[in-house]
Image (cartoon, grey):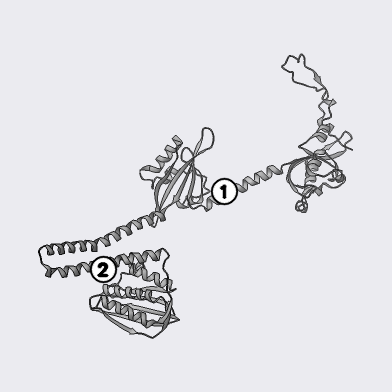
Amino acid sequence: MLLYPYNLLKPKRGTNFASNSCNNKHSMSTKKVDVQSFDFFKPLFSSAKQNTVIMLDINGNILDINPAFTGAFGYEREVIGKNFSMLFTENDQKKDRPQIELSTVIDRGQAFDNNYLVNKQGKVVWVSGESLLIKNDKGDKCILKIIQDIHEKKEADESILRLNETNESILKSIEDMVIVLDSDMNVTKANHAFYKLFHLKERSRETINFATVILPYDDNSTLVTKLQYALDTKICFSNAHLEIAIDEKDKKIFSCKCSIMQQSVNQHHVLLTAHDITIQKVLERNREDIIGFVAHELKNPLSTIILYNNMIENLLKENKTEEISSYIDKSNNSIRRLNSIIAELYRDTLNNSGNLTLNYSSFPALEFLQEAIETIRVTHPESNLFIKSFKTIPITGDKHKLIQVLTNYLDNAIKYSTRGTAIVIDVQHKDKQLIVSVKDNGKGIPKDEIPYVFERFFRAKKTKDLQGIGLGLHLSKQIINAHKGMVWVQSEEGNGSTFYFSIPV
């Protein structure tokens, strides 16, 4: 039997509700309506499409369900007499949520809930509802539970929440600065990179004004001016460079781009992204330095060749042939130097482009040692070379490239030593490694320059007047690295240097 809450719906005796008069020509008078003649509950229970209704006794047993509940959850009248706890998830049942809801309704007369219910197919559905304690004229009590299916809305809300969390994670992981500014250039949103660069607190409630933050680094307020112009005209910009040095050791260059974000009809924000291009700029500057350096090094021997050729031409005109041969020798020396520079640059370009290949063969270590010494004695007949110790060890490697390494070491030792001083070569076999060293008694290397001697184009400050472009040791390092070996140096300024390389035997 259905229990209807007449006592809750009946108006006070003597009270009538009048309908609103209509404003058309058919409305001639106001007709009084007897509210008590209407049964409010029956249409709600039987005809509602959105609101599902369950009637429970005070113990939670199901007395009746409306058609909307059947349509929404699939249960039909087979649930009559069963306890409504069957509709709750297993987890909620363990938490005793059905009993808590009953107790709340009985104690307070009503209860509100947001939780999952399980439909007939076992699918979990998120619902929102209200339970009311009602009684009829006889004083019989029951509970009216009105339920709304909010599953789609809840999923949409959670989807938005997950999307926001994903966006936050993406923003946090982006190394570029991403900043949203309002019309006053206050930061309304920014990612971790922005706060990290300027050492700002991410969750601070204080308003951060971007113009104030950037002022110490924005020369002539260039970026701020561009941003203000973008806000005023809605015209975006890109590729605006900004150099920021928070401290002396950390200097960064950013390429800035802005986009307009329309928040509402009359409100616009600016999305500013700043991409770190420090590495690209450093590489560009290094490339320009290298081009300038190489051009300078090529210019010197080329100018000498042109000068000697002009002198030879003048001597030929004056018929002074006996003086020509010395200038030809000098010109040839400059040509050899020019050819040597070009060859070094070519080899370095091949190596840095990944085209360094090794032609492996097995041979006694004595062979590449002797050939390197013979090569040096041809180009430096005045050299004073000594072999300290040597054992005949069979090795596997690229013999010609190992000769090149040892030749570079010997050539450097002669170049940076006083003419005629001893250059000592030592070969050791330790821990399955062939260790070769070349010791000179030259100028030595300052302590602060030692870490850079194998770098590309490096030249010690005190050797700028000597020939060479600083590629020999760099090429040697690449060759030994390709052999799975190591290079290093020991030196003391004023007391000579010892250069080493090792390769696996």
Q: Secondary structure at mark 1?
A: helix
Q: Is residue 366 left or right of residue 421?
A: right
The quarter of the displayed image where residue 307 is located: bottom left
Rendered view: 414 above or below 210? below
- Pointer 1 local density, CA inside 10 Å: few below 14, some 14–19, many at least 20: few
Q: Amino acid at mark 1?
A: Asn
- Which percent across, then down, holds residue 7? 84, 32
Q: Amino acid at mark 2?
A: Arg
Q: Is residue 132 visible?
A: no
- Looking at the rendered image, the disc whose residue lies closer to the viewer, 1 or 2, is 2
- Which percent across, then down, holds residue 101? 78, 45
- Which percent across, then down, holds residue 316? 13, 64
The quarter of the displayed image where residue 27 is located: top right
- Pointer 2 local density, CA inside 10 Å: few below 14, some 14–19, many at least 20: few
Q: Is residue 430 left or right of residue 79?
A: left
Q: Secondary structure at mark 2?
A: helix
Q: What residue is drawn where x is 45% and y is 50%?
A: 275
Give the numbered dot on residue 336.
2
Report the residue marked by disc 1: 167
Q: What residue is drawn where x is 39% and y is 73%?
A: 487
Give the distance between the C-alpha atoms of the residues marked 1 and 2, in whole angstroms: 63 Å
Rendered view: 416 above or below 167? below
Q: Is residue 40 left or right of residue 493?
A: right
- Residue nearer the viewer, 395 or 38: 395
Counting residues from the start of the chain, the first of labels 1 and 2 encountered is: 1
Q: How many marks?
A: 2
